[in-house]
Image (spheres, rainbow, N blue to C red):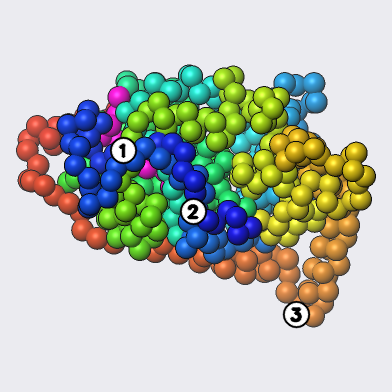
Amino acid sequence: MSSFFSRSTKSASSSTSSLNKLKGTDEAATNGVAKNHDIFTTPPAEASVKKKWNYDEHQLKQYTKTLMLPESDPYYPWEKRFLADPGTHPRYMRAAKWKMEDAKKRIKGTLEWRREYKPELIEPGDVSIEAESGKIILNGFDLDGRPVLYMRPGRENTEVSPRQIRHLIYHLERALDFMPPGQEQVAIIVDYKSATSQSNPSISTARKVLNILQNHYVERLGRGLVVNMPWWINAFFTGITPFLDPITRDKIRFNPKLTELCPASQLDAEFGGTNNFEFDHKTYWKTLTEFCHIASDGSRVNDKGEKWYPPAGNGIKAALEGLVPAPGAVATGHVIKSGENSPTTDEEKPSSAAEGAAAAVTAGAASAATTEKTEQEHHLQSTAATDEKTGSTGVEEGMKRMSLNRALTTAPGAPEGDVVFDHPPSAGEKAEVRQSLDQ
């Protein structure tokens, strides 16, 4: 897996330090580093995945089988792909704190949401206009190998519409594509520089976004980092705090020192890094689309231009290399070459990594099916043996895992740093905040 943690051969674009730079009014290098239009699609050598989750979700898997769409449904392959991701069921179990009925309710709600939104099939042409200002940019990784999403409300360029939500979902899906094997989470940096209370999302819009992040991308947020905070942001966060899950809230940090969390080589120079990135929409969008193998209709194509259903859970790079979750995998990032677990003749071997990846969803699902019964028997036997030795129950064991996972999940710690007040709020600014909160 070392190939995933080497410096990228960079290919295209992401963010600048201000809208003035977008207009070409400031050509000077930042911190003495020359500008570039490249985006990082793989983590640097100094980044590594610190936590690989263990799995225990057999009963939930059996439940989702009863919910799946019929094979005749056009969306069936994508739903199958989502459920075949080795991390999907464990994430919902963790989010539900190992309460089975709650986990069932949550994952059922997500399946219904995905059938409506079809996040894998959002067309790049549909949301491209939203990306023109660079208000959301995917570029680089933090020190734990999480893809970094930069969000800049000050660059808002469109009116409130469902397309803004689709644009966010599109970037979340691309962040999943960027993830190296073993990583399941994303880091989000929200930069309020140049933002106003009018450009900031309303409370109602923020609630919709929170609903999607917390309920349908469960356990996906690793860090939420808020920088360059204006005075009025306190009112905004006060408005959305009641809708934040406590674990999600614990992951948010205000005005942190980003160089302690992200490698300097991939951190925007505006935040103390050495990557003096200048956003160019055409270059950025082309790189994002090509690296993730997105077709014009939102579906995927392999290197030969053929329709493709890449396996989920280990990133697009692993999928292109023909890697699939190992049968009976008990930790994220446990991958093997497609077909490696069974002997094949030279004629049967894929002729390229892309061809191997094209069959990966089917191969991964098939191999999982052949071992599922064995896994369940082993799980029951090991659980019974543990209970017999210790006298503990499955619920107690679940609580122990919950405590461990919660501690690790909330590693970023409590908010730190002071709120930035550029000036005392005027009567007009206070009125703007009240209007924003009422929307």
Name the residue carrying label 1.
278
Of the pair 110 and 131, the residue shown nearer to us: 131
From the top left corner, tell me how far across and down residue 69 is, in percent: 75, 28
Name the residue carrying label 3.
390
Question: From the viewer's perspective, is 14 left or right of 60?
Answer: left
Identify the secondary structure beneath mark 3.
helix
Q: Is residue 150 magenta?
A: yes
Name the residue carrying label 2.
7
10 Å crowding of disc 3: few (<14), some (14-19), many (20+): few
Of the pair 122 and 344, the residue shown nearer to us: 344
Q: Quadrant of the N terminus?
A: bottom right
Is 214 above or below relative to 282? below
Q: Earlier in the sequence, mark 2 or mark 1?
A: 2
From the top left corner, tell me how far across and down residue 196 is, in percent: 20, 35
Q: Residue furthest bottom?
A: 389
Is 432 above or below relative to 232? above
Q: Quadrant of residue 439?
A: top left
Give the amino acid at mark 3.
Thr
Question: From the viewer's perspective, is 76 left or right of 144?
Answer: right
Question: Spatial distance from mark 2 to mark 1, Cα to Cα?
Answer: 19 Å
Give the amino acid at mark 1.
Glu
Identify the secondary structure beneath mark 1.
loop
10 Å crowding of disc 2: few (<14), some (14-19), many (20+): some
Q: From this viewpoint, is residue 21 visible?
A: yes
Residue segment shown in magenta: 148-157
Give the amino acid at mark 2.
Arg
Identify the secondary structure beneath mark 2.
loop
Of the pair 88 and 396, the residue shown nearer to us: 88
Question: Spatial distance from mark 3 to mark 1, Cα to Cα?
Answer: 58 Å
